[in-house]
Image (cartoon, helix red, strand yellow):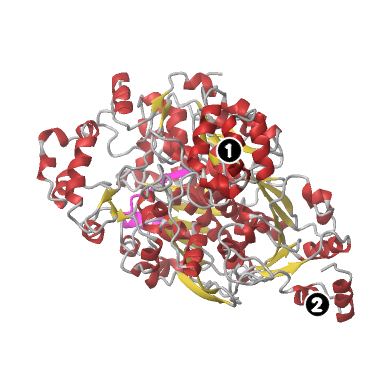
Amino acid sequence: MTDTPLGHLRVIDCGIVQAGPLITRYLGDWGAQVIRIESRNRPDAARTSHYPENKPGKEYWNQGAVFHEQMRNKLSICLELDDPEGVEILKKLMAVSDVFEESFPQRVMRKFGLDYESIKHINPGLIYISTVGYGHGGPYGDYRNYGMVSEAMSGISYLNGYEKDEPMRTSVPYTDHPSTYMGFLAVMSALEHRHQTGEGQWIDFSQYEAGIHMIGDAYVEYSLTGKMPTQNGNQHDEMAPHGVYPCTGEPGWIAIAIRNDTEWEMLKQLMREPDWSTNPLLDSVTGRISSNDELDNHISKWTEYQKAYELQELLQNHGIASGVVLDHSTLQLDPNMKDRKFYKMVQHHENQERVGKRPFPGPSAKMTETPGDIFRHAPMLGQHNNEVLGDILGYSPEEIERLVEKGVTGTLPIFHDSPAPKPLAPEQRINMVGQGAISSYNPNYRKQLGLDD
Amino acid sequence: MELNAPLSQVKIVDFDCGIAGSFCAKLLAELGAQVIKVETTTQGNVCRHIGPRIGSDSEETVSALHLYLNANKKGLKVNLKNSDSIEILSQLMNWGNIVIEDHPPGYMDSISLGYNNISTSNPGLVMTSITSFGQTGPYNQYESSELIVQALSGMLSNNGTEDREPLRFPRYQANFAAGANAAGVTLAALQYSRITGKGQFIDVSIQESVAGFYYSNHSLYTYTGMKSPSRGGKELYRTKDNGWAMPLKGRAEWDNYALFFDAIELLEEKYLTPQGQQLHAQEIQDILSEKILEMNKHDVVQGGQEAGYPFGMVQTLEEVLNCPQVEFRNHFDKVDHPNAGEATYSRLPFKLSSSDLPITTNAPKIGENNEEILRTILNYDNDEIIKLQQDNVI
C-alpha cells in the first residue's frame, strides 16, 4: 500500500444508510482500516439492493450494488449484539480503535451500554460520531428520518423548484450527501484536537442542521432583508440568459450562463443575430432578465437541433460558460472525467457471483503526496471474522469456533436457506418505466461501460 | 474564539477565494482555526457582489453571501498591483499551515505564490486548490458558474420533473459541497503533515466532489442499466393549512399506514402488495391527497413520528428559525453588524463534546485587520507599516 494520510487509524463502522457508512468510506479511501460491524440476523439492506444485471445469484447478499459502493475499502465482521458476548467483543474493538461511527437512536446504544458516556473510560482517545436525522436530544431527537425528509424540513425543498412554481423535493435523499463531507470534516477536526490534547470526544451530528448549513446564506439574507427568498428555477437574479436548453441526441440538455453584456454579444453572433435578438431592450442585463421566458424560448429553438457536446465546445471556445447535463449513464464517459481517471474499475471476488468489474467514483480529491485509492472491493458477509477476532483481538481458532457455534459470529445471513429473490423479468422492467419507478433502461450498458473488456 | 476549539492551533490563509474556497475556509474558521481572508482589489472579494446588497455602507459592498462565508475570519487587504504585496503574501503563507485558493489553474504560479514557490520555505504546508473541473484535463480552462458545474457534475439531472427541463439545486449547493469536501481532505493532509512533516498540494474539483457523493443512482446504472427517475413533485402533499407534508411510508406496515390517514379505501386487495402499490401508485397518491388535504402539516408530522413513521413537511425559512428542535440545540447565533443590523447564522451541523463552536465575529471589512496581522503575525514595526500604507502596498 502506498503512503496514505490516514493509514495509522482504525475505524469501527456501525452506521446505517446512508450518511454514516459514507463518512467511514472516505476514511477508508484515505487509508484507514475500516471494520464494518454486521448482523447475520438483520443484514444490511444495502446488501440486497440492485443485483448485477438484476439477477440475484448464489450468495446474493454478497452482490448488492449499493453495498459495494458504500463498503469498498472495508473489512466485514459479523457480531450479534443480542448476545452479551457480542457487545463485549465490540467494546474490545472500541478499546483498540481511533474512530467509532453509529447512527442509532440514543436509546439503542444506551440499552447495549455502548453510548459515549458508558464507553469513554475504556478508550479516552476514541473519536465517537453519532449521525442521526435531527441530532440527539430535544423534541425531534428520536424522530425517524430519511435524507429527503430532512431536506424538506431544512428549508431546501422550500427554496427548490421551477420559477414561479411550488416548492419541490429534489430527486435524491439530498441531505445525506453533504452530510457525508461535513461528517468526515467533523472527524478530521476531532483528530487534530486529539493530536493537540490526546483526548477523544463525542460528535453529535444532525442531518437536518447539515441541510440548514448548506443554505445558510439564505438565512442570513432573510434575517437582514426581511424578505424570504423563494424558488427561482434555473433563472438567476443577476444573469440572463441563464438556463437549461434542449439538444438532440444524448446528452439531451445543455446549461448556458451569460454573465455579462460582452458574453451576450458573443452569443448573439454565434446564433447569427436573429431578428428577435437585436431588440435594444436585450442590450442590458435588466432588460434580458425581464424577457427571461421569451429569451429561453428563442434559445431553445437554436439549441434543439444541435448536439450538446459540440455546442458546449463551440460556446466554451468563445468564452461562454456552458456545460452539458450529465447523469449517471453519461458521467463516466465525460472526456474530463476520463482524462482525470476519476472513476476506478474495481474487480470483485470470484464468490461475488457475476459482479466482475464495475466502475466506482474514486477518492474525492487528488492529493499529490498521498493519493487515496480503492484498495479493496467491498467485503462478503463476515469475510474478515478471523482476521479481526484473531489477529486484532487475539482470539484463538478454538474460541472463534465456539463463537460461531453460539451464533455470535458467522458468515451466513439468517435467510440463507430461504429461496433467493427472483430475477427481474424484462416485462417487469418495462412496467417500472411505465409506472415511473425508473426513467429508462439501456440494454447496452455493459458494453458502454467496458464491463466485458 | 474558543481556546479549546479543535483547530485552535491551525493557521490558514484564505487567498481571495470565491464561493467554494470561502466556504471551505469558513468551515475551518468555525472549528476555531485562525483564518486570514485576503482581499486584493479596491472593490473587494467577488462574493461581496453576489446577491442583494446589504446595509448602506458607501465605502464597501456587502452581500448576505459574503457575510455568511466570512464570519469568524480576519481581513487583510493588499494591493496586488504593487509587487511588494507578493512578499507580504509569501510571508503570510510561510506562517500558515494551510492555504486555500480557488483561482483558475496556473494563476497562483503566475504571481509566484504557487505551491512550488511556497513549499521550499514551508515544506509542511498543505495547499488546497478548488476549481470547477480540476487542475488537469480538457476542461481545466473552461468558463464556469454554479449552474454549469451542476450540469457537468450530474447534480441537475437529479432535480426537477420528468416532463420538464433538469432543474438547478437552490443557492450554491455544488460550490458548498466542494468546499465541505475540501475542508475535510485538507485536515486529513494536515494530519499527515503533523506526523511526517511533509505537506502537499491538493487538487479538488467541484465536478468530482458532486459526482462522487451521489452513489446509489450511480450503482443502479452500472449494475442494472436502469436510470433513476426525476422525483420532483412526488411525495409532497398539500395540507389544510396551506403547507406540504411528506408522509414517507418507510418501513411502516401498509394497513397501519393507511389507517393513520383514515384511508380505508387503501385496504382493498389490489393495494396490499408492494407490486400492487407500484402498479396503482397514481390512485394511491390521489386517495392520500384527499385525506391529507383535511389535515394540518404539524399533525401529520407529529402523529406520524409518534407512530414511528419518518414523516416530515416542507418548512419555510421562517418556520425553521422558530423550530423547537433548532431552539433546543441552539443552532442559530445572532451577530450584530454595524450597519446592516442583526444577522442570523447557522452553526456547524454537529456538536462537539470538547468545545462549543459559536459564530462570534462579523465578516471583516476590507483590510480591517491589516495592522494587527502585519504587527503580530509578520513582525512589522510601526514605521514599516506606515511605509507600506504610503506606498499603497496595503
From the viewer's perspective, is residue B319 above or below residue B286?
Answer: below
The percent position of residue A129, horizontal first and vertical second, equals 46, 60
Residue A132 in sight in this render: no
B31 sits to left or right of A401: right
Q: Mark 1 sits on what residue?
A: A256
**Any magenta on residue A85?**
yes
Which amino acid type is shown beneath numbered disc 2? Arg
Q: Quadrant of residue A271?
A: top right
The range drawn in magenta is A74-93
From the viewer's perspective, is residue B119 above or below residue A449?
Answer: below
Name the residue located 65 percent from the left edge and 51 percent from the top edge. A5
Q: Between residues A224 and A393, which one lies in front from this camera angle?
A: A224
Which amino acid type is shown beneath numbered disc 1? Ile
The percent position of residue A135, horizontal first and vertical second, equals 39, 63
* Secondary structure category for the residue under label 1: strand
The percent position of residue B328, horizontal first and vertical second, equals 37, 72
Q: Between residues A241 and B297, which one lies in front from this camera angle?
A: A241
From the viewer's perspective, is residue B99 above or below residue A164?
Answer: below
**Any magenta on residue B224?**
no
Please rate how many residues cluster around mark 2, counting C-alpha atoms within 10 Å: few if below 14, some from 14 to 19, many from 20. Answer: some
* Secondary structure category for the residue under label 2: helix
Name the residue located 35 percent from the left edge and 52 percent from the top edge. A149
Q: Nearer the viewer, mark 1 or mark 2?
A: 1
Q: Mark 2 sits on what residue?
A: B375
B268 sits to left or right of A25: left
